[in-house]
Amino acid sequence: MTGDHVVTTVDGCRLAVTVVAADGPGPVVLLRTPYGRHRLLGEAQGWARRGFTCVVGDVRGRFGSTGEFLPYVHEPADGAAVVDWVADQDFGGGPLLAAGASYGAYCAVTAALARPDVVRGVLASVPALGFGETAREPGGAARLACRVGWWAEHGGTSEPRAPQHDLSLLTQLPVVGLVERALGTTPPGWGEMWTAPRRDERLWNRLRELRMPLLAVGGLHDPFASHTVELAEAWGGPTRLVLGPWGHDLDSREPGAALGGQRIGSVYAQWAREVCSDGFGGDAGVIAVDSHGRWRSLDHRRTRLPCVVSDAAFVADPSDPFRSDVRFSEREDRALVRTDPLGAGEIAGRVTVALDAEADSVDADWVVRIALQNGDRLVPLTHAIGRYAHVPGRRREVVITTPPIGVLVAAGARLVVEVAGHHWPAHARNPHTGGDPVTATELLPGARHVHAAHLDVPWRGPGTAVVTPSALLDPPRPDQEVASMPATPTMPVESLIDPVTGIVRRLVDVAPVNGAPPRYTGVTAEIADARRLGAWPADRVSLGTTFGDPGGARTAALGEAVERYCGNRVAPGLLRAAAADLRGERMFGPGDLPFFAPWQHEAPRWPYRPFTDDLAVEWVKGTEDDEPCWLPASWVHLNYHSGERRREHRLHHLNYAGIATGTDERDAFRRGLLELLERDALELWWHLGGPSRGIDIDSVPGLAAEVAGSRLRVHLVELPTEHPAACVAAVVVDPVTGIVGGGGAARFDPVEACTKAVLEAVHTWVFTLGLVDPGGWVFEAIRAGILAEGLYLPFREDRRYLDDSGTSFGRVRDLGAQVQVWLDERVQERLLPRFTRPEQVIGVDELPRGDLDSLLSSLRRSGCRIAHYDLTTSDVAHTPLRVVRVCATGLVPNAPAAFRYWGLPRWREVIQERGWASDADPLGGPAGLVIEPPPFL
């Protein structure tokens, strides 16, 4: 029976199903989805490997099934038809289980309601349970961005449309007309969703009549987490509830999260075996209190925590709403509620926020966003929103219950609650007129006042026993890679350094270099050979530099070592798919990453092929705006094409920019994003011939003194950017050797940017010293087989490397060869004045400043999409260090001169906006562009 089949409904619709059979007779799992049954074939094969025949079906009107897709309308009857068809077949022969995630969970639940005598058990993951349930929060507020996005992609169509990323659409009124404005038509069901009751009471009442077991799996970061809990509470049969550290895709934002990814399938299979063997009984509910394996039973007890309220009075203006996509901010339109410092313990369940508050409008939305504050660090935990009627001038109690929280609390930490009046664009703006936000066309500001507050928290002190319910006991198969990490980092960073067992074998001080700045301090890290573990080509040496700070240089060297170690580890089991197969999901696809121009692909022996919708490649699941986003694995990992992956399609060169090590995930994300910004600013300014603004080195506190006593002449220039950060390039010119070395940096502090850029330039100079003599260390390394010979140009005594660079610098295939080009006096004569003779000189104080939140806001306003992926390996994760890859669609990364990314639309946008290289067309050819590389590694 393995293969494709058709189930005909009573009214004549033909529902497409695919059967993936187990090796022998046994139980059957039914999965139905509106997102394409082909996407679930991997899950179906996982069930089959565990002895369950799996039937995967497209719902009516989607992909292979005929009829019209009316969300939530036909699933009860169509589910019954498919259950009846399965029961009539000769495969399986065992019990039937209905399973599904999101909309598929609704399909599973309604199939059980329609055929309770046939369906033995229901597995509902991150359930989205109906029109009203998905349209509005339990507190009544209307969901906006996720609903508009879902209906614009999936409503009234058999296959998904392109995702909508234009936030300006969400500013338009009325909300009920948004999808029509986006699509030119209104999908069936869109309007009915907004008029539906918040709960389908008939469905919820019938759930109490069911007697088969339920496994309800929810994510603490899932917008429908409360629905998962409500489903488990309403179910009439025995229930298991698992609330893990996941989002709606059942993937964690953090490395090594317990039960994330593949291992969740083991939980499903364990539960299914118990159900089919009639060994399932009793209720159990567990919640993760961290991302790495600590589970607790759900706690319904509450501890009251008094709070202090500050900034108590504010105005909630829907014309300038408090935003959901910005972390804790300094905006004035919110109140802050803080608990006293807490003792060590944990929170495992729902939190209730009670406010003594007033509003001057007839109704008001009250938003609470809860974070855990530990020192200067704020970790967002959850949010909730409730709608309340008000009598202007009269105080009332506002009580808002959050979705479940699971978190470990260190002694001295406290809970901080932002109280606001809007949560846009996640939720529609309350107009403060008494009308429905979905149909409102008029918006009025509303004054708020929070007089007092307290929190009721499911608090437990230290020593709580770890819960290990049987649903979590199924161990992973040997071929599955599952991290086992502590709840919090348990090892110091220094534990990574050991001559026998360390990732870093030792740190070595670099001998002083003649002619360098006197306090230039370098430390190298000697890295263990990860190739002994497989196709893991991690760098063997890394470098850290400072001015006069050996400890800082050691930290930098170790950080770079960890970055290369983690970045080169490619885990098995990646998703292989064409971009067309992922249509309807967030991804960085061919339209986002058109790496090269047509003229580059037409060049003889061009090594990269076009990134097209029909090309199957491997993907990793990253995160964009707290939502899952598929990213090409080769764009995320370093040296991806190694081992068996050498046969994989090559779409681009090694992606140098946007990977960083930090003291935690946010710090690594910040560093990676700033690196992307710096490379973008350099690429655009350099290759489009932008004007030069020098930076007076004497205006940078302490920098002139650091380079005094060196034979190097130092020059600084601003790298223009429209975003709030200082981007700086530096060159050092050595009059003795004729070397020009360049470096760049982006920092929120301009002084730090200038200093780091000079350090990078000095490093380039040191590296280039190994290229000026045939016996230099670079050529010795090539002869020893440590460096690849083809990545460098052959040594020339006359240094006329331009003559060997090839057409359009096609032979300059590595960043190391770029500095060889800059040994040519002709290149220096033509291009060095851009650094040494700028049109204008400014002081360091004239450079822009910023912070991470303002940078993210600026990038998003410009249309830039930003995603990230945590590359931290499970061994490194025992320490505080984290390695993150940041990807952005609106920034140009660097590449060697032979492989510049001329296909990216950013070039043409900047040509038009700034007027640089106005006669150039990067898509048409190199004419009018500066194709010589900058003197940077």
Image (spheres, rainbow, N blue to C red):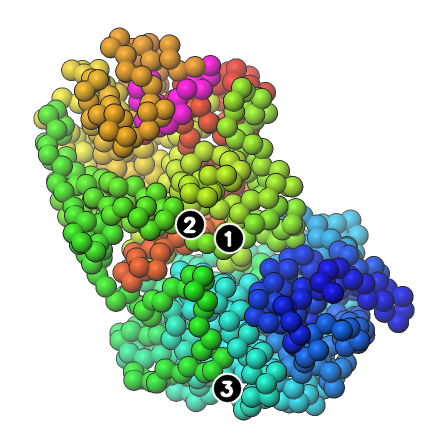
**Numbered range of the magenta stretch:** 807-822
Q: Are marks 1 and 2 in contact (CB under 8 Å)?
A: yes
Q: Are marks 3 and 2 in contact (CB under 8 Å)?
A: no
- In the image, 230 versus 287, the foreground residue is 287
Residue at the limit of the structure toward the front, as seen here: 24
Q: Position of residue 866 (x, y in %)?
A: 49, 47
Question: Which residue is tagged 1?
Answer: 574
Q: CA distance from mark 1 to mark 3?
A: 33 Å
- Tell me if mark 3 has few (under 14), some (14-19) or many (20+) residues whose alpha carbon lies within 10 angstroms of its own: some
- In the image, 846 versus 881, the foreground residue is 881
Q: Residue 570's mark?
A: 2
User: The residue under label 2 is which amino acid type?
Assistant: Val
Q: Residue at x 74, y 65 (%)?
A: 1
Considering the whole magenta stretch, tell me its main secondary structure. Answer: helix
Question: Which residue is tagged 3?
Answer: 284
Q: CA distance from mark 3 to mark 2?
A: 36 Å
Whether residue 800 is situated above or below residue 684 in the rendered picture = above
